[in-house]
Amino acid sequence: MKKILFCLHFLLLLSIGAFAQTTASGVSNVKIQISEERDKATITYDLARVSQVSAYNVAVKILLDGESINAIGLSGDLGPNIAPGFGKRIIWDIVKDVILDNPQELKVEVTGTPVAAPCMPMKTVPVYAGLAGVAATGAGLFISGLGAESNSKEIYQVYKDNPDPNDAVFSEMSRDDHYTEANKKHKQGTWLMIGGGAILAAGGFVMISRLAQVNRYNKDCASRGIGGNFKPRIHFEPVMVGDSYDNGIGLALTLKF
């Protein structure tokens, strides 16, 4: 009986775009060993660790005399999501599929299709999570500061318009006390507005950081052509206090669910 010729070929199916150059050598060092009884075959191979590839879908195609057979006796490192690494092993129970008792040519193809790594990790915390309370606190302090500042100006105006300390307008609070109270309200209003503004600024920094993360996530996905279209539905608009936008004090944040 003629010696059976075992021809082993390996292929790497390239996906389009970013993987065309980086995965050309993904499958390597393919070897096959047939048992003495010729009832089992051990196929070993390596899967390269390649940037932006998290796993491979590995398949084996067996041809006898150029005709493909439906091999059911395969087991081991084949199928979806095979991690990169060395010494991958596939066992073929030959007798489940064919009987090698006639001269024939056997061809085995090991095929690895790269699976794109997931987009860069992104926190599951919503962009706006926790910021409503921060905004409310900051705005509350800021508005309280505006009120205190307005009250300070009114009291000081009384002090300024009435230079006579014996004027009837000072029946409940002296002129000097008007000045002291106006100064007190002014300082109080200033600190409240500074504190409120600082809280709003901190909230804005958190928001900007989260939006920057979203932008990096989308760019990372888009660079590999695997999507990445997270779009926080956020809308900013002027806040109107009084009769016109000239009196506006900030921005309103609208979230669409």
Image (tube, rainbow, N blue to C red):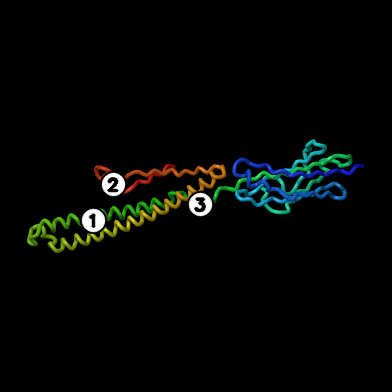
**Extreme residue in the front direction:** 21
Question: Identity of the amino acid at label 1?
Answer: Glu
Disc on res. 123: 3
Residue at 23% in and 59% down: 186
Mark 1 neighbour class, 10 Å CA radius: few under 14, some 14 to 19, many 20 or more: many
Please indicate whether residue 185 sits to the left or right of residue 3 in the image: left
SS for callout 3: loop
Disc on res. 109: none
Residue 82 in the image: above or below residue 180: above
**Extreme residue in the right direction:** 1
Mark 2 neighbour class, 10 Å CA radius: few under 14, some 14 to 19, many 20 or more: few
Question: Which label's residue is closer to the chain start, 2 or 1?
Answer: 1
SS for callout 2: loop
Mark 1, residue position = 149
Residue at 51% in and 46% down: 219
Residue at 44% in and 51% down: 129
Disc count in the image? 3
Measure the alpha-carbon separation of dots 1 and 3: 41 Å
Mark 3 neighbour class, 10 Å CA radius: few under 14, some 14 to 19, many 20 or more: few
Measure the alpha-carbon separation of dots 2 and 3: 34 Å
